């Protein structure tokens, strides 16, 4: 497998960034839900929110790397079996996912700062 993208398929870097981001973003939901249930006297009350902030910052940094990789690498051509509307819809969903991930990272950081806390990166 090639490191860079080709006209036929995505390279190892793009695939790795995709799956690492997917794992990070999906795992943040149950972690956030668990944190909501903690009370002040729980031993994880201070630790888990900081871990959540750090993982969120990591996700944003990886998103920046992923977007840079996307811009600087060739995009594989769509399969010829896909109809035009399918390709357009896939493109819209892809862009929406990037935009929503950026919004999620920025609003998460803004919430931490608005509470008067600093988000420490690990």
Image (tube, rainbow, N blue to C red):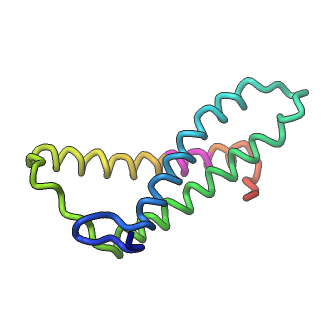
- Residue sitting at 33 percent across and 47 percent down? 96
For image coordinates 82% across by 42% down, the residue present is 47
Q: Main secondary structure of the magenta part?
A: helix
Please tell me in which quadrant of the rendered image residue 9 appears. bottom left
Q: Residue furthest front?
A: 1
Horizontal placement of 111 versus 66: left or right? Answer: right
Seen in the picture, residue 100 relative to 75 is either above or below; the reply is above
Q: Residue at x 29, y 45 (%)?
A: 93
Q: Between 59 and 112, which is closer to the camera in this rendering?
A: 59
Q: What percent of the width, then of the height, locates residue 112? A: 68, 46
Residue 89 x, y percent position in the rendering: 20, 44
The stretch of residues the image draws in magenta is 104-110
| Magenta residue check for 102 | no
Magenta region includes residue 105:
yes
Q: Residue at x 49, y 64 (%)?
A: 64
Q: Is 37 positioned to the left or the right of 30 in the image?
A: right
In depth, the one of 63 and 13 nearer the eye is 13
Residue 103 percent coordinates (x, y): 47, 48
Q: Name the quadrant of the C terminus.
A: bottom right
Query: In this rendering, is residue 14 above or below 114?
Result: below
Please say if 110 is above or below 29: below
**Res 100 → quadrant:** top left
How many numbered tags mark residues here? 0
Q: Is residue 52 left or right of residue 48?
A: left
Q: Quadrant of the N terminus?
A: bottom left
Give the x, y percent position of residue 27: 59, 40
């Amino acid at each position: 497998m090639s490191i860079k993208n080709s006209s036929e398929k995505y390279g190892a870097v793009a695939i790795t960034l995709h799956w690492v981001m997917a794992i990070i973003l999906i795992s943040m939901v149950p972690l956030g839900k668990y944190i909501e249930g903690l009370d002040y006297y729980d031993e994880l009350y201070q630790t888990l929110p900081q871990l959540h902030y750090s993982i969120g910052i990591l996700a944003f940094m990886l998103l920046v790397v992923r977007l840079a990789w996307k811009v600087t690498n060739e995009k594989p051509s769509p399969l010829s079996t896909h109809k035009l509307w399918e390709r357009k819809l896939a493109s819209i969903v892809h862009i929406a996912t990037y935009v929503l991930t950026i919004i999620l990272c920025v609003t998460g950081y803004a919430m931490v700062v608005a509470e008067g806390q600093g988000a420490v990166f690990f």
